[in-house]
Amino acid sequence: MEDLSHDSVNRFLLRERYEPKDLFDEVRLHINLVGGTLSGDDTVIDKPHSDLQLTELIGYYYSGRHHRIVKGIQLITLYYTDLSGKSVPVNYRIYNKQDCQTKNDYLREMITEVLVWGLQPYTVTTDAWYSSHKNLKFFKNKELQFLTGIAKNRSCSVDGKNFTQVQNLEIPETGLMVYLKKFGQVKVFRRSFKNETYRYYIMYLPNKDALFLVSLADFQELHSIHWGIECYHRAIKQVCGIQRFMVRTSEAIKTHLFSAIRAFTQLELMRSEELIENWYELQRNLSLQVARDFILEHLKQKVGLNAHGQLPVNA
């Protein structure tokens, strides 16, 4: 790293051209492509001090972390968990208003791509933002079962005739079979959160008999798998430095984001092979070593430590 200069990094960011397919081609060699769970979600990479007039791809987006509109880059990701529990990003988009597409458009486009590339997921999971009728029918047409959050005012019916908002239904812990308006039969679950608020989720399986047999444990397992993409978003910010760039052009920003995502996949592969315990281990060990070296050097200057880092002993 001693020979790595700021200029060489800038040249790399400006020169290289990576696409999401490059990421998939690298990770496909390390995962089971069949039968896993494909999770879709987005996150905002905070860039509060960037100038919108000078830095491309920066905009204003709603942040679930801050619960308000913030300045930054919006990253939409497909995150795949295979049957062994290995989890990696397999496709992504950087929101660009010049594309004239919505986050839902990006999601459907990315799923179509990974299916063409050879991924064969069994299940798709998303949050409520991606639960539009168009998306649900898209999943169904692709013969994918799914778990997705829904808004509390979505119209459902137990008998298929009398529709009401899902929040008005008496939903047992084991779930309730309902008809979702303009879609069909699903199983709805409810989870309670702090402040006595509820969130609602629906599960769909192509086989209605199998859908009826979906248990609370099945729902909890899929919900837990989907939580992995939230952990991924946290890791690429805290460990991989995805928000730490000082370039302005779209291509340079894209190269930086690709590099940060690729760094995460390396950490996940190391974790899955038990070379590290978790994604944060390398960062923690590096920080501890730097802190140790600094303290020892500081003490040496103050109290005259010997070459072995030991305090002198009075005879």
Image (spheres, grey):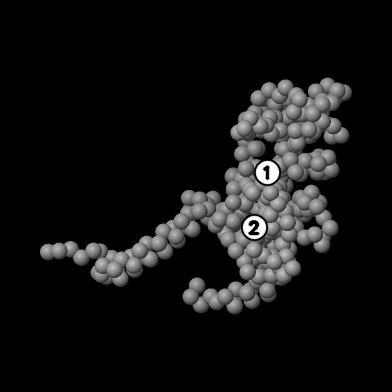
**What is the spatial separation of the Cα atoms under label 1 and label 2, in whole angstroms?**
28 Å
Circle 1/circle 2 CB separation < 8 Å:
no
Query: Horizontal and vertical percent for residue 112?
Result: 79, 51
Disc 1 secondary structure class:
strand
Categorize mark 2 by other alpha carbons within 10 Å: few (<14), some (14-19), many (20+).
Answer: many
- Identify the residue under disc 1: 37
Where does label 2 land, which residue? 46
Residue 66 picture location, percent across and down: 64, 49
- Would residue 112 be visible to someone looking at this image? no
Q: Is residue 314 above or below residue 166?
A: below
Residue 45's image quarter? bottom right
Indicate the amino acid at tag 1: Thr
Q: Residue at x 68, y 75 (%)?
A: 15
Element under disc 2:
strand
Q: Is residue 182 left or right of residue 115?
A: right
> Residue 111's spot in the image, x, y percent?
76, 50
Q: Residue furthest left?
A: 315
